[in-house]
Each structure stands twice: as C-alpha cells, then as structure tokens.
Image (tube, helix red, strand yellow):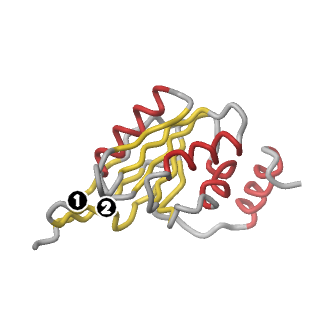
Amino acid sequence: MQLELKTVQIEKDEEINFILGQSHFVKTIEDIYEAMVTAVPNVKFGVAFCEASMRRLLRRAGTDDELIQLAVKNALAIGAGHSFIIMMKDCFPINVLGAVKAVPEVCSIYCSTANPTTVIVVEMGESRGIMGVLDGKKPLGVEDEKYEGERKDFLRKVGYKM
C-alpha cells in the first residue's frame, strides 16, 4: 500500500486554545471529560476522540456545545485513529495539561496551543495517523536581556511566578 501525506489546518478562533493528543481506549472520552472538569471548575471545553477499532466512531463530550462541535469538526478533518482534540475557552492548556497527561489512556500530546496550527497526517488504506504538527511560526532571533525581563515580568503579572 502507498502512504499519502496530507495537511489539516486546525480551524478555530484566535482566543481558543486546544490540546491535540493520542490515546488508546474508548473510555478516553469520559476520562478526559473528568480530568477537565476536575482541573478547572466551570471550564468551557469540547473534546472529540476518534475511535480506531470496533465501531470506529467519533466520541464527543464537553461543557460547551459550540466547543464540542468545533472539536468534532477538527477531529473529523484530522481523522487519525485514537487521536483526540480538546478545544477550550477562557482556560489555558497550562491549567489542565497535567490532568490530561495523567489520564491513563493518554499516550502522548502533540501540541497544546492557541497558535495557528497545521497537523501533518499520513494515510495508508483505511488507516490514518498523525506524523506531527506545525505550531505557530519559526523563531526570528534569540532572546536578549530586555525580552527576558519582559517575559519574567509577564509571568509574574499573570500569576504564574512569584
């Protein structure tokens, strides 16, 4: 069989963050839901999970109908077996990433970002997998003392460092 590379642009509004990962079992959808609502009270999110065997259905859950539909749209476009995508609003990946990574079924995280992102997928027959992601843009230079100070000030301003 021949391998075919494809690219899928993640569709979302600028303020929406997302996590893209791979898992291995149908109960992933329920466990990610529980991880999200436990990590951040009143979190607004949608998650979609592509089941890779048996019925091969796209499973979905969340607390916000629009974000659930956005997760479904992107998961269908990616279409990779056992992949999942969590779309979140008014919440940052740093607030939930540890909880999501601690879900026993989660194998890996490809990215967690609000940046424009392209997913590189490979297709062979009825199978499709994620090869990698293009997250944001390439660097323009090396941080100097001025930008290091700005970064440190920002992290303290938003409460991530003391």
What amino acid does circle 2 point to?
A: Ile
Q: Quadrant of residue 150?
A: bottom right
Q: Give me the residue at 60% from left, 60% from top.
A: 101
Q: Residues within 10 Å of mark 2 (few under 14, many from 20)?
A: some
Residue at the outermost bottom position:
1
Rendered position, 86 above or below 66: below
Residue 114 locus on image (x, y percent): 52, 46
Give the mark nearer the N terminus: 1 vs 2.
1
- Quarter the C terminus occupies: bottom right
Q: Secondary structure at mark 2?
A: strand
- Which mark is on residue 94? none
Rendered position, 10 above or below 107: above
What amino acid does circle 1 point to?
A: Lys
Q: Give me the residue at 17% from left, 60% from top.
A: 126
Residue 23 locus on image (x, y percent): 46, 60
* Viewer-proximal residue among 118 and 20: 20
* Viewer-proximal residue among 33 and 12: 33
Residue 148 locus on image (x, y percent): 74, 63
Mark 1–mark 2 CB contact (< 8 Å)? yes
Q: Give me the residue at 47% from left, 58% from top.
A: 21
In the image, 43: left or right of 129?
right
Tell me the residue that label 2 is attached to. Answer: 120
Residue 47 locus on image (x, y percent): 48, 42
Residue at the outermost top position:
65
Q: Secondary structure at mark 1?
A: strand
Residue at the outermost right position:
162
Tell me the residue that label 1 is attached to. Answer: 6
- Quarter the N terminus occupies: bottom left
Rendered position, 112 above or below 43: below
Q: Residues within 10 Å of mark 1 (few under 14, many from 20)?
A: some
